[in-house]
């Protein structure tokens, strides 16, 4: 590997990290070095600074790989062994120095660190842990650290990672075992889920210990997350929703992130010729939101998908698709309906529903009252009954999509 300066390495390894979607920083413990004799950084206030890549992906300001060299040859990965890309590798000290340097300049408020596999899983994991250890112990860094861990690594190394990092994540890679076997034959679904189960137990034990003893060391206070690639195999949206629900239940994940397969340079011949529309990734995030905040069951979200193809519609959001499929549940009376029914109304979020429930204790709500709590009452009126408004029964309407916009097609940026 040619000798590169730090700036050249940063250009290569920050660009390679943009395919990791799981960079959110929510849920960790509050820490601040204010008033402390030693230490630098904080997880309070504005939290992690985020930027958005031109393709809409969220990236943190120091989101890098330790190296983009890898001994694995996963077909969908830009860093796979057979990919013709420029390689680079940071030392642990270089990552530590970069993190502190960027933080002192107020460019970042945390670190997201992932890596390709070099030499062995244990050796790579040791390097990742050394970065987090040095930041915490040698420099008193109190900012956010998210480590992407390696499921094949020694459990003792994963335990060491959890002592220093706020969040750990293990990529489940693909929604189905068949897809993983075909596109990443060197990885094992059993080993991946075994590592996720180990992290869940360690996180639970750590939380129990900190509740009992103030001096007990914390373990990954922001929990664990995972990421799966969408569109590289034949999994339908219905399959993906079911898989995500299982992961949430089994391993108490904080988040499941979705990453639409990208046409990486020199793509493997076994991959689809076309990438999936990014809107598909967006619809899956919306379905994930429905399960986590609106109390939809996975089978209810799956019912919003097309019965023949198992895919969620791209032209309307899955909450609206579900409402149109189950029209007999609407319209909902805002002055009498329980919170669970109001949360099913397309366009009403958790904050608006809580506002409706609080306001109706004092008066019967009119359409304009609901309009003050939402962005657009036009989208909602077909689904609501208020003191002064009763729509034509949605179940009897002839037009199937009263609020749907004309179907849009995502164009290729560099199409001829």
Image: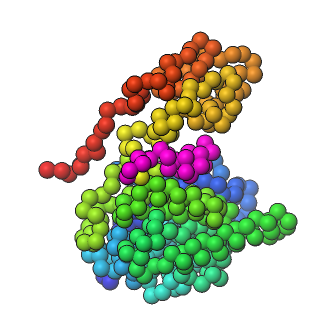
Towards the viewer: 324 or 376:
324
Q: Position of residue 186 (x, y in %)?
A: 42, 82
Q: Residue at x 48, y 86 (%)?
A: 120
Tell me if I can see residue 111 in this picture: no
Q: Name the image quarter holding the N terminus.
A: bottom left
305 horizontally vs 131: left or right: left
Is residue 303 highlighted in magenta? Answer: yes
- Residue at point 58%, 78% (across, down): 130
Indicate the quadrant where residue 200 lies.
bottom right
Q: Is residue 271 left or right of residue 90?
A: left
Residue 49: give x, y in percent of width and height: 52, 51
Which residues are drawn in magenta? 285-309
Q: Position of residue 44 (x, y in %)?
A: 65, 51
Above or below for 187 versus 76: below
For the image shown, how many numbered marks are present on the structure?
Answer: 0
Q: Nearer the viewer, residue 244 or 44?
A: 244
Q: Residue at x 44, y 54 (%)?
A: 237
Q: Main secondary structure of the magenta part?
A: helix
């Amino acid at each position: 590997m040619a000798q590169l300066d730090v700036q050249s390495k940063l250009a290569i390894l920050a660009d390679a990290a943009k395919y990791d979607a799981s960079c959110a920083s929510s849920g960790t413990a509050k820490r601040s070095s204010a008033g402390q004799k030693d230490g630098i950084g904080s997880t309070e206030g504005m939290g992690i600074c985020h930027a958005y890549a031109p393709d809409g992906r969220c990236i943190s300001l120091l989101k890098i790989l330790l190296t983009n060299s890898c001994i694995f040859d996963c077909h969908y990965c830009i860093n796979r062994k057979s990919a013709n890309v420029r390689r680079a590798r940071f030392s642990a000290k270089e990552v530590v120095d970069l993190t502190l340097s960027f933080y002192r300049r107020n460019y970042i408020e945390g670190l997201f660190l992932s890596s390709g596999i070099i030499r062995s899983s244990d050796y790579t994991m040791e390097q990742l842990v050394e970065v987090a250890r040095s930041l915490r112990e040698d420099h008193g860094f109190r900012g956010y650290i998210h480590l992407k861990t390696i499921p094949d690594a020694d459990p003792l190394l994963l335990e060491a990672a959890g002592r220093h990092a706020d969040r750990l994540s293990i990529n489940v890679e693909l929604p189905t075992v068949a897809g993983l076997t075909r596109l990443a034959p060197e990885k094992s679904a059993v080993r991946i889920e075994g590592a996720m189960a180990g992290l869940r137990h360690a996180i639970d034990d750590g939380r129990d210990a900190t509740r009992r003893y103030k001096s007990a060391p914390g373990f990954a206070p922001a929990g664990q997350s995972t990421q799966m690639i969408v569109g590289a195999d034949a999994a339908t949206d219905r399959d993906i929703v079911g898989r995500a629900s299982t992961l949430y239940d089994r391993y108490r994940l904080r988040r499941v992130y979705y990453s639409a397969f990208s046409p990486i340079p020199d793509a493997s011949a076994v991959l689809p010729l076309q990438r999936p529309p990014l809107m598909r990734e967006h619809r899956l995030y919306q379905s994930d939101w429905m399960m986590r905040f609106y109390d939809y069951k996975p089978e209810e979200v799956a019912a919003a998908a097309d019965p023949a193809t198992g895919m969620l519609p791209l032209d309307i959001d899955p909450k609206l698709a579900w409402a149109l499929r189950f029209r007999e549940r609407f319209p909902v009376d805002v002055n009498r309906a329980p919170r669970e029914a109001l949360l099913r109304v397309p366009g009403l979020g958790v904050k608006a529903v809580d506002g409706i429930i609080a306001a109706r204790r004092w008066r019967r709500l009119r359409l304009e009252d609901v309009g003050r709590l939402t962005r657009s009452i036009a989208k909602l009126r077909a689904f609501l009954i208020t003191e002064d408004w009763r729509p034509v029964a949605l179940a009897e309407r002839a037009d199937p999509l009263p609020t749907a916009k004309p179907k849009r097609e995502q164009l290729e940026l560099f199409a001829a």
